[in-house]
């Protein structure tokens, strides 16, 4: 028996199929349980797209942004090629609509067990996001060239080589398909998020909660320093945690409950050298004018990554990701965790890459 196409089922579900053909489809449903099941799934998916897009519309949308119905139609493949191209061009300029599209798809992906029969939405998303990704890559590369040319001549000599490497990394991250790491299986949840590797002030200790009534003690035995808290994030400047520039330290986190130690975690950090701090301060003065802020944060992340300050790079990439989600940035974050040999944290972001 020849099954109905996905497009025929979608048209039927949305009551847009020609009346003459509608009767033929109804007759086919009577004898084909597979297509009846597919139609029920299509109805569920159509409702889910509507609900997801409706709940994800961002308040700052402007009058040129597309409605939830247009986004639903786009994902369902019911937009003509000419109009689709116009929508994609808008998406390349509008982070609001890109966020709505991505969040809508994320909601669908989490709540709907897609099969190859229902892959049109995913193919549509891939087409649109590939165009958006390419546009952003070209924009970032152009801004890198402009930024370098705007620096004083002496600074150009300092930064040009670094930014040539940064341009190569941007081209790789924003390629299609987005690079990804092999999945990790059977690993426990990571509790400590930072700090690791090379750091600068303020130094941030961050970990996930171990549950109620837990007390945390952070120690650096080399300098006889410790602090006890019930919080899961601590931030210290030079006045509260005096470390020597360029020196490596081992820290330890002790988790206590009912006066018993239930877990101990340690790691290593190296405070930036004075020369590195001078370079960072110089860069900070000149990058302040880069707009929009999500692009400036990508520049910051790339700069820290180039200097092997991977924790700082991760923070900038995450801040940019929170403004405008990007598979490329998920990869950049996963890459930095990989350089720090934090396999589980790498995997958390590797799963976000689409």
Image (cartoon, rainbow, N blue to C red):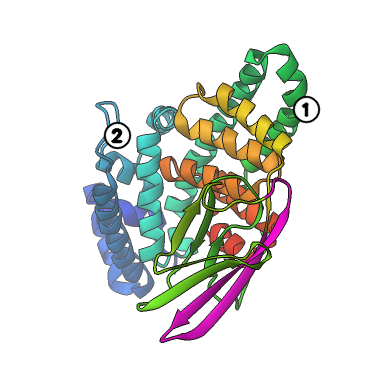
**Sequence-first tag of 1 and 2:** 2
Q: Please, is residue 280 above or below residue 149 in the view? A: below
Residue 21 is at least partly visible in this image: no
Q: Is residue 217 left or right of residue 80?
A: right
Q: Quadrant of residue 57?
A: top left
Q: How many marks?
A: 2
Residue named by callout 2: 66
Q: Is residue 162 left or right of residue 32?
A: right
Q: Please, is residue 239 above or below residue 225 in the view? A: above
The boundaries of the magenta stretch are 244-268
Q: Please, is residue 342 above or below residue 22 in the view? A: below
Residue 326 is at least partly visible in this image: yes
Q: Nearer the viewer, residue 118 or 201?
A: 201
Of helix, strand and loop, which one carries label 2? loop
Crowding at mark 1 (Cα within 10 Å: few <14, some 14-19, many 20+): few
Q: Is residue 324 left or right of residue 271?
A: left
Give the residue at x 27% y 33%.
Answer: 61
Q: Nearer the viewer, residue 272 or 338?
A: 272
- In reply to whether residue 264 is colored magenta, the answer given is yes
Of helix, strand and loop, which one carries label 1? helix
Q: Position of residue 64 (x, y in %)?
A: 29, 26
Label drawn at residue 201: none
Quadrant where the N terminus is found in the figure: bottom left
Whether label 1 touches label 2, CB < 8 Å:
no
Give the residue at x 35% y 72%.
Answer: 32
Q: Position of residue 191 (x, y in %)?
A: 52, 70
Q: Please, is residue 60 above or below residue 321 in the view? A: above
Residue named by callout 1: 161
Separation (CA) of disc 1 from disc 2: 42 Å
Q: Magenta: predominant secondary structure element?
A: strand
Q: Nearer the viewer, residue 76 or 90?
A: 90
Q: Nearer the viewer, mark 1 or mark 2?
A: 1
């Amino acid at each position: 028996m020849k099954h109905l196409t996905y497009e025929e089922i979608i048209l039927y579900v949305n009551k847009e199929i020609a009346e003459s053909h509608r009767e033929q489809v109804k007759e086919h449903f009577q004898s084909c349980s597979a297509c009846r099941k597919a139609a029920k799934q299509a109805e569920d998916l159509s409702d889910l797209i509507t609900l997801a897009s409706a709940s994800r519309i961002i308040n700052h949308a402007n009058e040129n942004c597309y409605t939830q119905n247009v986004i639903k139609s786009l994902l369902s493949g019911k937009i003509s090629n000419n109009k689709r191209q116009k929508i994609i061009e808008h998406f390349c300029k509008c982070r609001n609509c890109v966020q709505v599209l991505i969040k809508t798809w994320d909601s669908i992906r989490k709540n709907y067990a897609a099969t190859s029969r229902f892959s049109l939405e995913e193919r549509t998303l891939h087409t649109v996001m590939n165009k958006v990704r390419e546009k952003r890559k070209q924009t970032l590369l152009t801004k890198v060239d402009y930024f370098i040319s705007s620096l004083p001549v002496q600074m150009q000599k300092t930064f040009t080589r670094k930014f040539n490497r940064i341009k190569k990394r941007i081209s790789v991250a924003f390629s299609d398909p987005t690079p990804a790491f092999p999945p990790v299986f059977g690993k426990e949840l990571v509790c400590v998020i930072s700090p690791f590797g090379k750091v600068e002030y303020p130094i941030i200790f961050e970990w996930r909660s171990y549950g109620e009534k837990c007390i945390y003690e952070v120690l650096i035995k080399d300098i006889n320093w410790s602090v006890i808290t019930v919080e899961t994030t601590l931030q210290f400047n030079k006045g509260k945690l005096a470390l020597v520039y360029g020196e490596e330290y081992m820290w330890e986190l002790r988790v206590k409950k009912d006066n018993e130690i239930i877990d101990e975690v340690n790691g290593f950090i190296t405070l930036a050298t004075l020369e590195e701090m001078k370079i960072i301060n110089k860069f900070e003065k000149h990058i302040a004018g880069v707009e929009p802020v999500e692009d400036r944060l990508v520049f910051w992340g790339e700069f820290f990554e180039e200097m092997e300050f991977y924790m700082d790079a991760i923070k900038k990439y995450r801040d940019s990701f929170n403004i405008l989600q990007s598979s490329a940035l998920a990869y950049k974050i996963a890459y930095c965790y990989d350089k720090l040999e934090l396999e589980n944290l790498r995997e958390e972001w590797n799963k976000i890459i689409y």
